[in-house]
Amino acid sequence: MNVIYIIWLRQLKRDLHSRAWIIAAFGQPVMYLLALTFGFGPFYQKASGLNYLQFLVPGVISMGIIFPAVLSGMEIVWDRQFGFLKETLVAPVSRFKIVLGRILGGATLALIRGMLVFIFCLALGFRIENTALLPVAFAWMFFIAVFCASIGTVIGSLLEDIQSFQLMMNFFIMPFFLFSNALFPLDRLPQGMRTIVSLNPLSHGIDGLRGSLTHGFFFGAGADLCVLGIFTAILFILASYLFSLIEP
Amino acid sequence: MIEVYELSKKFGDFCAVDRVSFSVPEGVIFGFLGPNGAGKTTTIRMLTTMLRPTGGRMLVDGHDPVKEQYQVRRSFGIVFQDPSLDEELTAFENMDFHGVLYGLPSWERRQNIEKLLCLVELEERQDELVKFFSTGMKRRLEVARALLHQPKILFLDEPTLGLDPQTRKRIWDYIKDLNQGQKLTVFFTTHYLDEVERAADQIAIIDQGRIIVNDTPSNIKNKTGSSSLEDAFILLTGKVIRDEDPSAMDRMRLRRKFRRKR
Ligand SMILES: Nc1ncnc2c1ncn2[C@@H]1O[C@H](COP(=O)(O)OP(=O)(O)OP(=O)(O)O)[C@@H](O)[C@H]1O
Ligand SMILES: [Mg+2]
């Protein structure tokens, strides 16, 4: 327990010691939010009669969570390159605990960032439909964060240098995000695209968050929970396994 | 305390450690010497559960590093050849992290950390981020960290590289104290022959993966008829310990860099 806690705490401390993270946390999601609401908002309103901001915000909050959570997996590559990984790997603790601590740490940091984006959106005029569901929404945010931190850990355990991680971000994580329901609704998509987006586990996380904040669920809360739960479990086990293979 | 029998490690066709056998009794300071690329670090990596050997047997504190990793990991502390601190944490946080990993209760952590940071003269800078430390300060912190959980065996892979003579002496004095007082077993590699001469009870010289000599410093000097270890070393390996030939050294470094990249 202590071991998981100290690894979790380390992730947090590292992050808070460097101040650049605040800018990084806000930058990307806020840019998307502003550009898309002002750019697409009017079209969306005309086509559906609904407010785009209300639709987009859960997607943008997810964005604020997804990228830092996946990046927290890159820390493994960094720790390996800076040698610190050795220190944890020769200690008499199970690799499983190390992975769990790392994933929870990365997820917590991503959650904090998501919260900041959320507050910013509230200031911009986003309205929560049902305040009683707010804790549920936070739970979904954390769930998405754990899912993405597990993906990051899988990738981080496989890669050996930072350059290839950037490549992964651009050609794997970015499409993963774009082909989800973060930025557009599913109802009017062509069948092929709709299937792809529905098969993306991330869509179910975002649907869960969106459902509890505003529009109600598209897939249904139970389906969302099942899909994201199963994928998170698989990725977590895979991450622990791949991490245990690392030779310091 | 450490028993090694016919230990081998092959990387592909290349034999980095070639059927090496030696033993280090409890309470002995054992110096592991050899030119660059001889296989010193590879041997340490196998003894400390980081690398699986391709042949032979080992026992560390009575346990097999391949099959009983947990017990072996409990028994030793290590200073790696390459840096291994978390630069984004403070000196104290690095120590504390280590203490928790090794299961020390908080009162013991606080007490030992304070004592060890004083020893390496970092107590006044304990709340500074490690990335602002000089190379020597980082090294001192790593030595302190390796001793924090009071291991039975201490592995030191070129621990005093880049340290000034006073600090080197201080650290060795402390290690010798622990060695005498608590029977700490020490396994170290170094390129400083004067250090070996002063500190080691026993020496093994390794070259190209094979052990050439394994004896006490005085016996080695007597046998080779040399007045200093330096002469004995050259006589035995045909090389100067600090490999001054740039081409040979560069070749090795390049090869190693290339391998790391893959
Ligand atoms: N992972 C690896 N893959 C392939 N070859 C390796 C690997 N690690 C080490 N070697 C090779 O094994 C040999 C022994 O390396 P080792 O690091 O044990 O030397 P060393 O005695 O510690 O040298 P130094 O004094 O420079 O630290 C070298 O030729 C090195 O290139
Ligand atoms: Mg070495």
Image: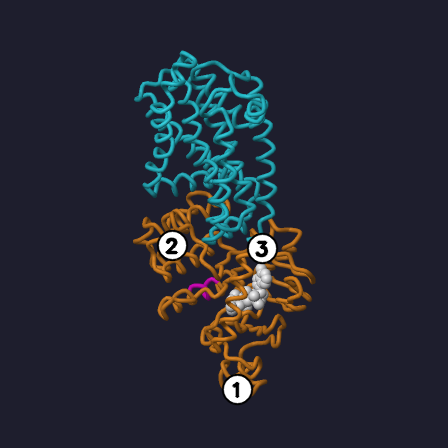
Chain colours: A cyan, B orange
Q: Residue at x 56, y 84 (%)?
A: B235
Q: Residues within 10 Å of mark 3 (few under 14, many from 20)?
A: many
Q: Nearer the viewer, residue A179 or B18?
A: A179
Residue at horizontal 58%, vertical 55%? Answer: B50
Q: Position of residue B1 (x, y in %)?
A: 60, 62
Q: Nearer the viewer, residue A23 or A6?
A: A23
Q: Nearer the viewer, mark 3 or mark 1?
A: 3
Which residue type does callout 3 highlight?
Met
Expressed as whole percent of the image width and height from the top left, the position of residue A213 reads 43, 17
Q: Earlier in the sequence, mark 3 or mark 1?
A: 3
Residue A42 locus on image (x, y percent): 36, 18
> Please, what is the dominant secondary structure of the magenta stretch?
helix
Q: Nearer the viewer, mark 3 or mark 2?
A: 3
Residue B60 placement: quadrant: bottom right
| Residue B176 located within the stretch drawn in magenta | yes
Q: What residue is at 34 percent from the left and 43 percent from the top?
A: A18
Which residue was labeled with disc 2? B115
Q: Is residue A100 above or below residue A224?
A: below
Could you tell me if residue B197 is visible in this image? no
Cα gap from disc 3 to disc 2, whole angstroms: 29 Å
Residue at which label 3 appears: B50
Q: CA distance from mark 2 to mark 1?
A: 41 Å
Q: Secondary structure at mark 1?
A: loop
Q: Is residue B144 visible?
A: yes
Marker disc for residue B226 = 1
* Among numbered discs 3 and 2, the one appearing first in the sequence: 3
Q: Nearer the viewer, residue B175 or B251?
A: B251
Q: Which residues are magenta?
A: B174-178
- Chain under label 3? B
Check the residue under mark 1 and report the chain it is in.
B
Can marks 3 and 1 be said to lie on one chain? yes
**In this rendering, do the residues under marks 3 and 2 share a single chain?**
yes
